[in-house]
Amino acid sequence: MNANVIHTGDVFVTYGFPFIDDRNGGDIYGMIDAMNLLINSINDETRIIPGHGPICYKKDIVAYRDMLVTVETRIKDGISNNLSIEEIKNQNPIKGFTMYLDVFFNTEQVYNMVKKKLKK
């Protein structure tokens, strides 16, 4: 039997920016990698049960991954342009993503993840 259904748990949610548990090794890059792995493992008809929210499809995973990449890129660009954390906050890295609430979004948290990656 091929049900073509995936349950993602909280790695993919539809309520907003994900909670990233950086205290236990999580980071935005792991979230992006997980989305890429998922995208490459499913087809357009795969039903996706998110950790929270309604049934979704591949296009929703792609949009979510693209949101994560855009936020990471905006913060990385700010760092590359020597902007302070306050200046990056003022630019609002999640602007334009009205479908996503910012419940768990913390500019400083993602900023630190990006800075750590850039140092490697």
Image (tube, helix red, strand yellow):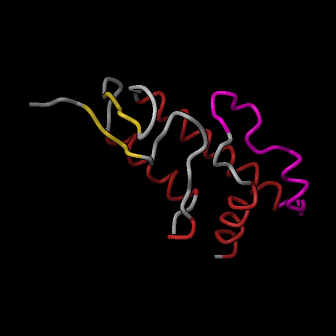
Residue 91 on the magenta segment: yes
Q: Residue 26, position in %: x, y? A: 52, 64
Q: Of 15 and 90, which appears nearest the observer? A: 15
Which residue is drawn at the image coordinates 72% and 68% (left, top)? 115
Which residue is drawn at the image coordinates 85% and 60% (left, top)? 85
Specify the segment rendered in magenta: 80-101
- Residue that sits furthest to the bottom in the current view: 120
Which residue is drawn at the image coordinates 38% and 26% (left, top)? 55
Q: Main secondary structure of the magenta part?
A: loop
- Residue that sits furthest to the top in the current view: 45
Using the image, determine if residue 86 lies above or below residue 90. below
Using the image, determine if residue 56 lies above or below residue 75. above
Q: Left or right: where does residue 52 sit relative to residue 95?
A: left
Number of numbered labels in the structure image = 0
Q: Left or right: where does residue 46 sit relative to residue 81?
A: left
Q: Residue 66, position in %: x, y? A: 59, 39
Residue 102 on the magenta segment: no
Q: Left or right: where does residue 54 sit relative to residue 84?
A: left
Image quadrant containing the N terminus: top left
Q: Quadrant of residue 68?
A: top right
